[in-house]
Image (spheres, rainbow, N blue to C red):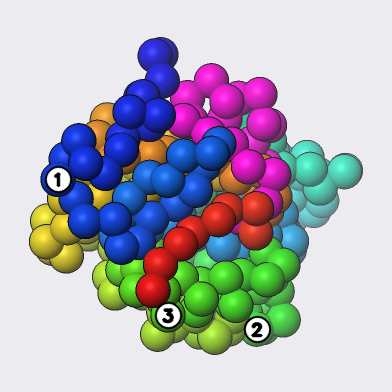
């Protein structure tokens, strides 16, 4: 896919007043809105999600009176290696909302002979019980320096938005545990705009609701799907970050306008 020419996104071309923007490869690209993905971008994906998914599998298997063999099957179906705990970057885990993970677990139980409806209810109950028993504050790990990074962006005059495929209930719990619940001007979660990323609808909706044009918007994410969503929406710049996510740099570079090792390497200017 051809890269959007961010080198050409110079302020005077669009008549944009260059008050806030991002410096990238020696260029100053004006923008007023920064849209973030959540998991893998603001939140350390593996550290936050692997223990949660392991707990879901453990509770589910226990509720069925089954053993570790089923637990391993469930973990595999959610894209986690049961032995190493490694998350498959191309599996469902980095991109699927809770509702899809429930369906994935249901399908695994169905293949083991459980009736579909019963399996779905059992998986849903296990997810709910996990939420009640696990300490979100303990397992939610933000990427290093994320709180000062976001508050500085805010103080420079940027509008900030979150575009996540995670459900609102889980999103609010995670943001609250990281003390980031009041940083964003707009948060859009799974199911609130359909279809989800990589469809560009969530990006288009955010720009429309905040009345900020796409050409003054940059999108930061950790997956190929994030980059495709930003590109197809037509934002000024799509930025992939490696730290915190599970997608390899080479994969991100195929679609992102630019890739950084860490969100802290980004240089925004403003008031
Ligand atoms: Mg992500």
Q: Residue at x 67, y 64 (%)?
A: 143
Q: Is residue 104 visible?
A: no
Gap between marks 3 and 1 measured at Cα: 24 Å
**Quadrant, the N terminus:** top left
Up the image or down, 169 lies above or below 219; here it is below
**Sequence order check, earlier mark of 3 and 2:** 2
**Quadrant, the C terminus:** bottom left
Q: Is residue 121 left or right of residue 137?
A: left
**Sequence order check, earlier mark of 3 and 1:** 1
Q: Which mark is residue 137?
A: 2
Q: Residue at x 69, y 44 (%)?
A: 261
Q: Residues within 10 Å of mark 1 (few under 14, many from 20)?
A: few
Residue furthest right in the image: 83
Task: Report the residue marked by disc 1.
Answer: 15
Mark 1 sits near ligand 1, with its Cβ under 8 Å away: no
Which of the two residues, 225 or 271, is positioned nearer the viewer here? Answer: 271
Q: Is residue 100 left or right of residue 33?
A: right
Gap between marks 1 and 2 measured at Cα: 45 Å
Residue furthest top in the image: 1
Position in image of residue 48 (x %, y %):
67, 64
Asked whether the beta carbons under mark 1 and mark 2 sit within 8 Å of each other, the answer is no
- Secondary element at tag 3: helix
Q: Which residues are magenta?
A: 246-263
Q: How many marks?
A: 3
């Amino acid at each position: 896919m051809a890269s959007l020419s961010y080198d050409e996104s110079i302020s005077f071309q669009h008549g944009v007043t260059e008050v806030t923007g991002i410096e990238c490869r020696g260029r100053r690209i004006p923008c007023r809105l920064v849209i973030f993905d959540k998991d893998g971008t603001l939140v350390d994906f593996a550290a936050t999600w692997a223990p949660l998914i392991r707990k879901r599998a453990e509770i589910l298997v226990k509720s069925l009176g089954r053993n570790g063999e089923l637990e391993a099957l469930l973990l595999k179906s959610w894209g986690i290696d049961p032995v190493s705990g490694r998350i498959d970057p191309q599996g469902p885990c980095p991109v699927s909302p809770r509702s899809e993970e429930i369906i994935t677990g249901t399908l695994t139980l169905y293949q083991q002979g459980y009736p579909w409806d019963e399996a779905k209810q059992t998986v849903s109950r296990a997810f709910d019980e996990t939420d009640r028993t696990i300490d979100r504050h303990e397992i939610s790990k933000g990427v290093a320096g994320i709180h000062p990074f976001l508050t500085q962006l805010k103080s420079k005059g940027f509008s900030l938005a979150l575009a996540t495929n995670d459900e609102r209930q889980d999103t609010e719990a995670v943001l609250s545990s990281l003390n980031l619940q009041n940083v964003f001007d707009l948060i859009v979660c799974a199911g609130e705009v359909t279809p989800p990323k990589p469809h560009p609808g969530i990006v288009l909706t955010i720009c429309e609701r905040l009345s900020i044009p796409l050409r003054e918007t940059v999108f930061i994410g950790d997956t190929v799907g994030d980059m495709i969503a930003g590109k197809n929406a037509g934002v000024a710049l799509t930025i992939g970050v490696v730290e915190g996510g599970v997608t390899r740099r080479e994969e991100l570079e195929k679609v992102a306008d630019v890739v950084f090792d860490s969100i802290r390497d980004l240089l925004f200017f403003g008031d």
